[in-house]
Image (cartoon, grey):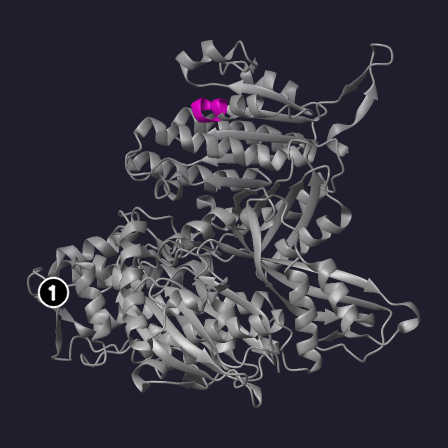
């Protein structure tokens, strides 16, 4: 192994609900140990976009301070990776082709060439490609494969997905963090990509091969279909739990803070995301008082459930349609994995099962050591994913990636991306 | 091109395009739309006529285009205009009986002549126009379906929800007319394009040959590196493609992709694949592509989608179900006025709550920031204590 044995990494998420800062150490086997954790409400973030930079900057400073005091390590001295929720990110599908004389055996070099050919070239300096991944390879006679190394073909076509964003929007989003650190970030990471890394483990690779992971956040829902160590499709929708809270707020003319609290208390209120029609037979009503000065209202539980049900049913319907459009269902060999704050809502798994007709479970990041309430919380999956992805990127930069064929490919490809 | 046949003219070597199409604007909205089309693009191959029924406006229009005065002899004059035409496009609002009457008569004359007839109509705003006018418009559309190859309806009411809150009545009319003009020109431009195009009257006829159907038109435009995605997003969010509750499913459609003259064959193939992927499988869609020199890097997508009318025998159960729902709603309404108001008014103001000042999240023509139950028109028991 190279010089990096156990490095310090910081993962940061400016979420719609909370700002999270995790300072961790990551060993050569990509096992994460949480050293310090800071979490504060973000308040001035809507649908993953910062609306009040000075305020959010102050909140970030508070979260950093909390994490640093626990870890005894300064964030600025670590490798810092910031999650990009994706409200202003779009995906571009392109392909690159390499012709092979006399049906040559395909080598990692051929993959690098095909990927380089296929990589999306931004037409102006205002946009940038943040990350890319290879969806699949096509060989002769329309053979579709994921790992073509060692096969023979006269043509190799790489289908590359590039994650593209406007440079100014990224700068603007990252500005409050950079302001606090007084230095640049190591990288920004598109949230759906981080999800697969959160499930990565040294032994056995990805813990959930062939699964679709859905991260239901407060403002943005991200998803990724994981195939082996790669991805088949990723995406995001700027709809999350805040939309359900807003629907309740509009319906019952309540302050948004009250309806957010109703969602947080869903379990205690014995409510479910899967609406149960009761014709008002349930005697239980939900008090919307919440001590927020909005007066007290008793809401019919069935109506609250119905409104929330419709919102998440629509959200899952959109993901379902996108998966259909990408012809991704045929690639799935596993089930549906839910994470994010929304995954904790009672009935969410049941609704996902009804919508997707696949087994559903709630997951948290794997191979992470730390307080159970943090590392075992499905809301924190992406932060730990960003940290592991950061470590892998650094290893690739320093050529420490484990020497399997796929790793070699990634090493070459990563170096190309850095040009 | 069939619609732009060129012939040796009487002026020596000069080649004169044959105007095999006739574009007629009827009434105020129709005339304004045709004038706007004339300002935006040449639309060669179409002779433009203004049949204005609005006295004051006519004096201003006569300077800019051919005018058809709807006096006692106008029908003979109109029949003369139909000679050697392959396609007649009638554009009109349905705000007055005079417009509706002229439109019905014209479409009948076109039908008798055996010329293909395409009608674009702008319906009245049901939100603030007289109920009688709205009803009359609906009845006129039904009659026109018998006479024309296709009636493309631009429903003003669907545009209503896309207007900003502070829009004035005049601005609403102007915007609706602009949509009408854009819809007409987007469909006709590829037909008369001198550039490479596989859009022809045959393809249009394929879509329009079935009577008793209504067509809706959606428009999307995008430029930059992800032009296709942007254009598709815009198309999906086009208010004209919003479905009315209870509408029949779309059974056929024509999607025209207009691309720049710089677009390579491979790029065109990719764009076509991407756009095809955005449409549902069961729909029978014909995809056409044409090059438009007015587009630099951009892509324009025009989708003409056909919805068949529900046959009478199928209408009854639907009507019974509808009546049962109305009865149920009325019962609830007697209990609580507030809830009933929400269920009865499909065009009631939709609320955005905390997202009112934010960039909307759009998907498939819907603004996802609007509560789902409101967009789905789901009756919810909202009574609180």
Quarter of the figure with the N terminus of chain A: bottom right
The residue at the point 52 percent across, 10 percent down is B62
Q: Is residue A68 magenta?
A: no
**Can you tell which quarter of the image residue B21 is in?**
top right
The residue at the point 43 percent across, 22 percent down is B28
Residue at the right extreme, as displayed: A102
Please indicate whether residue A292 sits to the left or right of residue A240 in the image: left
Q: Position of residue A214 (x, y in %)?
A: 45, 73
Please indicate whether residue A130 sits to the left or right of residue A411 in the image: left
Q: Which span of residues is magenta-colored?
A: B26-32
| Closer to the camera in the image, A29 or A216 | A29
Q: Secondary structure at mark 1?
A: loop
Q: Position of residue A195 (x, y in %)?
A: 48, 74
Quarter of the figure with the C terminus of chain A: bottom right
Q: Residues within 10 Å of mark 1 (few under 14, many from 20)?
A: some
The residue indicated by pointer 1 is B384
Badge 1: chain ID: B
Q: Position of residue A242 (x, y in %)?
A: 30, 63
Q: How many marks?
A: 1
| Residue B83, above or below B383 | above
| Residue B188, above or below A88 | above
| Residue A117, above or below B226 | below
**Can you tell which quarter of the image residue A360 is in?**
bottom left
């Amino acid at each position: 192994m190279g010089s990096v044995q156990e490095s310090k990494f910081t993962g940061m998420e400016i979420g719609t609900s909370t700002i999270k800062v995790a300072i961790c150490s990551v060993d050569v086997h990509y096992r994460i140990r949480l050293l310090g954790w800071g979490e504060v409400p973000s308040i001035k973030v809507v649908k993953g976009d910062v609306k009040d930079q000075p305020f959010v900057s102050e909140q970030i400073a508070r979260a950093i301070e909390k994490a640093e005091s626990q870890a005894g390590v300064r964030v600025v001295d670590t490798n810092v990776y910031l999650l990009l929720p994706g409200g202003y990110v779009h995906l571009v599908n392109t392909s690159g082709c390499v012709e092979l004389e006399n049906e040559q055996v395909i080598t990692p070099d051929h993959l690098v060439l095909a990927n380089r050919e296929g990589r999306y070239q931004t037409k102006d300096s205002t946009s940038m490609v943040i990350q890319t991944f290879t969806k699949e390879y096509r060989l002769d006679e329309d053979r579709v494969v994921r790992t073509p190394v060692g096969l023979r073909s006269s043509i190799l076509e790489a289908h590359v997905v590039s994650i593209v964003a406007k440079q100014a929007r990224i700068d603007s989003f990252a500005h409050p963090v950079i302001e606090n650190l007084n230095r640049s970030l190591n990288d920004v990471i598109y949230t759906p990509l981080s999800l697969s890394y959160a499930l990565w483990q040294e032994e056995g690779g990805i813990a959930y091969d062939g699964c679709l992971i859905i991260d239901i956040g407060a403002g943005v829902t991200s998803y990724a279909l994981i195939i082996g160590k790669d991805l088949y499709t990723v995406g995001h929708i700027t709809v999350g739990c805040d939309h359900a809270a807003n629907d309740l707020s509009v319906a019952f003319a309540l302050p948004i803070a009250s309806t957010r609290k109703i969602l947080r208390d869903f379990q205690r209120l014995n409510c479910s995301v899967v609406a149960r029609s009761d014709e008002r037979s349930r005697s239980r009503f939900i008090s919307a008082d919440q001590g927020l000065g909005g007066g007290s209202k008793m809401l019919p539980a069935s109506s609250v459930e119905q409104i929330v049900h419709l919102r998440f049913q629509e959200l899952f319907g959109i993901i379902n349609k996108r998966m259909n459009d990408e012809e991704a269902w045929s690639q799935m060999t596993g089930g549906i994995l839910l994470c994010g704050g929304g995954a904790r809502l009672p009935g969410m798994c049941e609704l996902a099962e009804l919508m997707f007709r696949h087994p559903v479970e709630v997951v948290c990041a794997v191979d992470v050591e730390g307080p159970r309430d943090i590392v075992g919380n499905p809301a924190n999956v992406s932060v730990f994913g960003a940290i592991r992805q950061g470590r892998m990127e650094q290893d690739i930069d320093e050529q420490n990636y484990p020497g399997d064929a796929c790793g070699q490919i990634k090493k070459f490809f990563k170096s190309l991306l850095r040009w | 091109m069939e619609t732009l046949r060129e012939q040796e003219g009487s002026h020596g070597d000069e080649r004169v395009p044959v105007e095999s199409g006739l574009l007629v604007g009827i009434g105020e909205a129709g005339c304004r739309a045709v004038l706007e089309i004339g300002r935006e693009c040449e639309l060669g191959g179409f002779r433009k006529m203004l049949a204005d029924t609005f006295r004051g406006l006519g004096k201003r229009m006569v300077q800019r285009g051919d005018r058809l005065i709807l006096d006692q002899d106008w029908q003979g004059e109109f029949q003369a205009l139909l000679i050697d035409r392959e396609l007649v496009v009638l554009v009109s609002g349905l705000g007055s009986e005079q417009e509706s009457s002229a439109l019905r008569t014209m479409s009948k004359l076109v039908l008798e002549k055996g010329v293909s007839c395409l009608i674009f109509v702008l319906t009245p705003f049901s939100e603030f126009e007289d109920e009688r006018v709205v009803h009359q418009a609906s009845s006129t559309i039904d009659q026109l379906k018998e006479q024309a190859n296709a009636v493309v309806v631009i429903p003003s009411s669907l545009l209503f929800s896309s207007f900003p809150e502070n829009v004035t009545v005049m601005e609403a009319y102007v915007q609706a007319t602009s949509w009408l003009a854009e819809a007409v020109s987007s469909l006709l431009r590829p037909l008369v394009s001198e550039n490479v195009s596989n859009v022809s009257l045959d393809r249009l006829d394929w879509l329009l040959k079935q009577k008793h159907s209504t067509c809706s038109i959606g428009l999307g435009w995008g430029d930059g590196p992800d032009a296709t995605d942007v254009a598709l997003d815009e198309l999906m969010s086009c208010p004209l493609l919003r479905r009315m509750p209870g509408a029949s499913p779309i059974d056929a459609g024509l999607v025209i992709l207009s691309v720049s003259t710089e677009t390579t064959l491979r790029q065109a193939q990719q764009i076509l694949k991407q756009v095809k992927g955005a449409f549902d499988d069961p729909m029978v869609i014909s995809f056409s592509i044409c090059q438009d020199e007015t587009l630099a890097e951009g892509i324009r997508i025009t989708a003409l989608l056909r919805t068949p009318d529900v046959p009478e025998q199928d209408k009854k159960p639907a009507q019974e179900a509808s009546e049962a729902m109305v009865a149920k709603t009325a019962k609830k309404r007697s209990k609580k006025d507030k809830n009933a108001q929400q269920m009865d008014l499909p065009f009631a103001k939709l609320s955005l709550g905390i997202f009112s000042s934010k960039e909307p999240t759009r998907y498939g023509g819907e603004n996802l920031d609007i509560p789902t139950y409101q967009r789905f028109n789901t009756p919810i028991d909202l009574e609180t204590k």
